[in-house]
Image (cartoon, coloured by chain):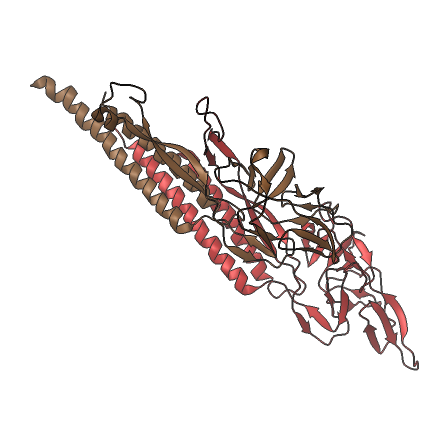
Amino acid sequence: MDSGYYAACTALKTQSSALELIANNVANINTSGYRAQLPSFESLLVEGRNSTQSNGWSRLVNQFAVLDGARLDLTEGNLQGTGNPLDLALDGPGFFAVQTKAGVLYTRDGNFRLSAKGQLTTASGDAVLGADGPINVPGSQQIAIGPDGTISLAGAVTGKLRLVEFPPGAQLTAVGGQYYSAPTTAATAAVHTSIQAGMLESSNVNPVAAVVALITAQRQAEMVGRAMSAFYTDFNHIAADELPRV
Amino acid sequence: MLRALYTGASGMSAQEMNLENVANNLANSSTAGFRKRRLQFEDLIYQNVVMPGAASTQQTTIAAGLQIGLGARSAASEIVQSQGDFSQTGNSLDLAIQGQGFFQVTLPSGETAYTRSGAFHLDSQGNVVTADGNPMDPAISIPPNATSVTIGSDGTVSVTSPGQTAAQQVGAIQLALFQNPGGLNSVGGNLFLATTASGDPIVGTPGGSEGEGTIQQGYLEQSNVDVVEEFVQMIVAQRSYEASSRVVQAADEMFQNVNGLGR
């Protein structure tokens, strides 16, 4: 049948997947340390990738748009002052390293606290890693964290937070809870990142961009829906009902 | 497409809870010794449609995978331990703590509860009790003939009686500290209970080296709720709720469109 019909079908599926991505961004508009996902579209040439028979026309009608991936928007979110000395915001492209049951994961959400055992943990209770493993704060001493991640207890330096950066194009996989996993070889010690204590980095979802993307996805879905019904009802109707009568 | 509906709904319910938290903070903006809570959110799990790093050919890997997240949830409401403002009352049993400690109070069940609210009173037997009548721990009683009560910054309670020149010590207030005060369990009445998250209390003398803080007699610590900040948070909650409801609407319309195809 008309390949345009399938192109429109594909576009509709693509736009509904795009809507799902946007929905997740909007739901996390207020999640500290969340990184927005940007949809990236690709035209899928069904025919003629390696074929010699493809001509311009068939390429044109077979360029289906598919959602081939989502990349993380790594721009920085706004900083919100909280006054809690264990709330840390990262200024720069770095990530905190966290020891979880699933191995070392990375996060931008610096909403840390001390566990009952005196360990520095994330909001979900996973140990934040320092240069030499988890960070322990004995007793209830005053903790201060410097811009370069130096931890001092009652004025004496006791350790350093492990901050990592990833080269452009590193594969960061979102695992939920504002954690990201990455290949261990990709992480390098941070050089362009500093810490602002007493602040939290808010989500970097731009509400304006999110709503515009939402409207675009919705209207494009409407348009391809119109195209589908043109193929389905008008063309096929003429082909099946009108033509035989002639 | 149903995913977007539920994702939008998850954002709405998270923001609804945010508003509920703001409402409670605002309602307690003039409760002495109240500690505000701050709601934190986290993103839910992701469905991997295309796994990043998977091989696209023998030589190349997929640079950006397609991961579709399933929304947000409210993860925790942490107690914010910033200091509230002090207001002078002149009442000798109004105490404020300058530091991180908590007063200890014995509940009728025998359990110890912790509070930042230092509005104490005397009961008919002369015991120092909270407004609800729970005695302070360690128990302190003031002799009926005492003319004045003085409480030092280190918690020493002394009284003067008629006919005596020297003040007499009748007890000492001790303060409790927690490793993770954000993990305390609020039980209402300005009281907190210790949990496994907060850790066991470290009891010490006010003014000690652990950071318990010092006691100021004649002052009350106000709530640490910042009304302006709560209003800003309220606007954020409301607008984020609207944005998520807009997503639900868009998903609904798209769905409706699909159902209308082929008619």
Which of the 4 image quadrants contains residue A237? top left
Q: Position of residue B34 (x, y in %)?
A: 65, 61
Q: Quadrant of the C terminus of chain B?
A: top left
- Residue B60 higher or lower than A191, as above or below: above
- Residue B84 higher or lower than A238, as above or below: below
Q: Quadrant of the N terminus of chain B?
A: top left
Q: Position of residue B18 (x, y in %)?
A: 53, 51
Judging by colour alone, the chain drawn in brown in this rendered image is A
Q: Is residue A99 left or right of residue A228?
A: right
Q: How many marks?
A: 0
Q: Residue at x 27, y 26 (%)?
A: A62
For the residue pair A61 and B63, the one nearer the viewer reads as B63
Q: Position of residue A32 (x, y in %)?
A: 54, 49
- Residue A1 appears in view: yes
For the residue pair B234 and A76, the one nearer the viewer reads as A76
- Residue A213 higher or lower than A224, as above or below: below
Q: Is residue B72 left or right of residue B213?
A: left
- Residue B105 appears in view: no
Q: Is residue B262 left or right of residue A67?
A: left
Q: Position of residue A64 (x, y in %)?
A: 30, 29
Q: Residue at x 39, y 37 (%)?
A: A40
Which of the 4 image quadrants contains residue B121? bottom right
Q: Is residue A65 left or right of residue A90?
A: left
- Residue B88 higher or lower than A46, as above or below: below
Judging by colour alone, the chain drawn in red in this rendered image is B
